[in-house]
Image (cartoon, grey):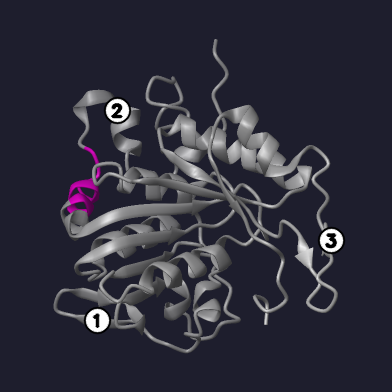
Amino acid sequence: MEEVPQGCPGTGSAQAGRGASCQGCPNQRLCASGAGAAPDPAIEEIKEKMKTVKHKILVLSGKGGVGKSTFSAHLAHGLAEDENTQVALLDIDICGPSIPKIMGLEGEQVHQSGSGWSPVFVEDNLGVMSVGFLLSSPDDAVIWRGPKKNGMIKQFLRDVDWGEVDYLIVDTPPGTSDEHLSAVQYLSAAHIDGAVIITTPQEVSLQDVRKEINFCHKVKLPIIGVVENMSVFICPKCKKESQIFPPTTGGAEVMCQDLKIPLLGKVPLDPHIGG
């Protein structure tokens, strides 16, 4: 018997809808019961909601601490430089929401309107949503099982009044688990443009990123490309380049060549970013 892959076991598996990774998945009933069960109606509701969103991009990495949220924030700001481009940044890192801090929005609250939750706006053309806005304190721990995380992501995608948006950027937590499956499956009918995968140069990061690439292939999520973050450090005084994270196996460049996926670029380690 073929080994069930990590994460989603696939609709053809005997474990479909029954495995641990299926808990909280919007398609769990359908997979477990076969064609007779109805899919989660939220999938169609989200498809309808997302008709006003032109492009949907997920920012992924199997590894924590590689700069997904920082990259997501920079990408959002970069796209919003064009005042005619409407950008939305959605933080689905339920247990470690760092986007409010990075975007300078700590202490902001979500407001309810007749058409749903209103995003918090950094600029007129850049709106942000995060579970961090729902916590009474940034030190509060979110201790939730998979189904509750899944429900929160459903609300973010279905109940937020994003309006007419050119780019929706979704910042995700590390790994290939509940949040990733929920985002991909809830957006499955709405078309996802693809994933940008973030890594750092060292093998311990690339090892987890390969798992993330495998995840994308298994759930049929297109890969836009890979960004190598913290690639080198350039001393602000002497301008000498130093490799803080040595690419012992060739870094993202060699990995991308091996896996035949695009390397979008390399971002240096800059103290100003962490300031």
Q: Nearer the viewer, mark 2 or mark 3?
A: 3
Which residue does the numbered mark 3 point to in the structure image? 242
Which residue does the numbered mark 1 point to in the structure image? 112
Q: Which of marks 2 and 1 is in front?
A: 1
Q: Quadrant of residue 156?
A: bottom left
Q: Which of 80 and 154 is in front in this view?
A: 80
Residue 270 in the image, given as x and y percentages of width and height: 70, 71
Residue type at mark 3 is: Ser
Residue type at mark 2 is: Ser
Q: What stretch is highlighted in magenta?
A: 39-47
The mark that comes first in sequence, 2 or 3, is 2
- Is residue 254 found left or right of 148 in the rendered image? right
Which residue does the numbered mark 2 point to in the structure image? 33
Quick check: can you spot residue 235?
yes
Few, some or many C-alpha atoms within 10 Å of disc 3 (few <14, some 14-19, many ≥20)? some
Q: Which of marks 1 and 3 is in front?
A: 3
* Residue 216 highlighted magenta (yes or no): no
Tell me the SS state at disc 2: helix
Q: Which of 228 and 135 is in front in this view?
A: 228
